[in-house]
Amino acid sequence: MKVLARRFNIYLALAVLLGLACGCQTGKKTSNAALRVHIEVSPDLTGTSQNISVLRSNPVLVTIKREPILSEDNIVRAKVIDAMGGFALEIKFDENGTWLLEQYSAANPGAHFVIFGQWGKKISDGRWLADPIIGRRISNGTLAFTPDCSREEADQLALGLSNVAKENHKKMLK
C-alpha cells in the first residue's frame, strides 16, 4: 500500500509540474483595457445619474447616466489616428454597438458622449478622457475623439482595446 501511495504522489507531482509548464505563458505579454461611453443627462434624484469632472487641464463638470451605453465588449477595432494638431482615438463598434451609437446620437443632438478609459495594470491608469459633443447622427459605428492623454497612453489604450476585441471575437466563434 505504501508503494502505491508513493507512486501516486510522484504522478501527482509530475502532473502539477507538467500543468505549470504548459499553462504558463511567461513570454507572452498581453495588454487589456476598458472603454466606457456614457451619455450626458439631466440630473435626477433616482440615482441613475452622477456628476463627473472631465479633462485635467481645464475641468468640466458633466452629469452622466451612471450606466454606460457602450463598453469594450462592443468594440471591433481601436486605433490611434493622426488628426489636425495632434492625434485622436478611433473606435469601431460591432453591429449592436453601431445601432446603439446611432440611436443615442440621433436622440441627443447637442449633448455629450462622456468617455472613460482604463489601461495598464493600475486602476490609476484610467480616467475620464473626453466629452465630445454630439453634432450629428453617427450611423457608421465609428466614434473618433481627441483624448485627454499622451500619445503613449493612447497607444496603450488602443492596443489593449484591440486585444480585448480579439478575445471577444474568439469567444464568439467557440
Image (cartoon, rainbow, N blue to C red):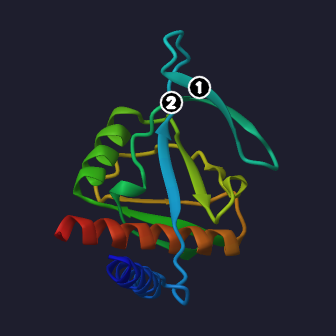
Q: What's the distance in space between the residues labelled 2 and 1, CA to CA?
A: 6 Å
140 relative to 86 in the view: left or right: left
From where the camera sits, is residue 81 visible? yes
| Residue 144, horizontal then vertical, whole percent | 48, 61
Q: Which residue is mark 2?
A: 66
**The residue under label 2 is which amino acid type?**
Arg
Residue closest to the eye, 66 or 172: 172
Q: Residue furthest top?
A: 45
The amino acid marked with disc number 1 is: Gln
Q: Are marks 2 and 1 in contact (CB under 8 Å)?
A: yes
The location of residue 26, given as percent across then percent down, is 55, 85
Most extreme residue toward the right, as rendered? Answer: 57
Q: Earlier in the sequence, mark 2 or mark 1?
A: 1
Q: Dot 2: within a 10 Å radius of its alpha carbon, few (fewer than 14), some, or many (20 or more) residues?
A: some
Tell me which residue sits at (32%, 65%) in the image. Answer: 168
Mark 1 lies on residue: 50
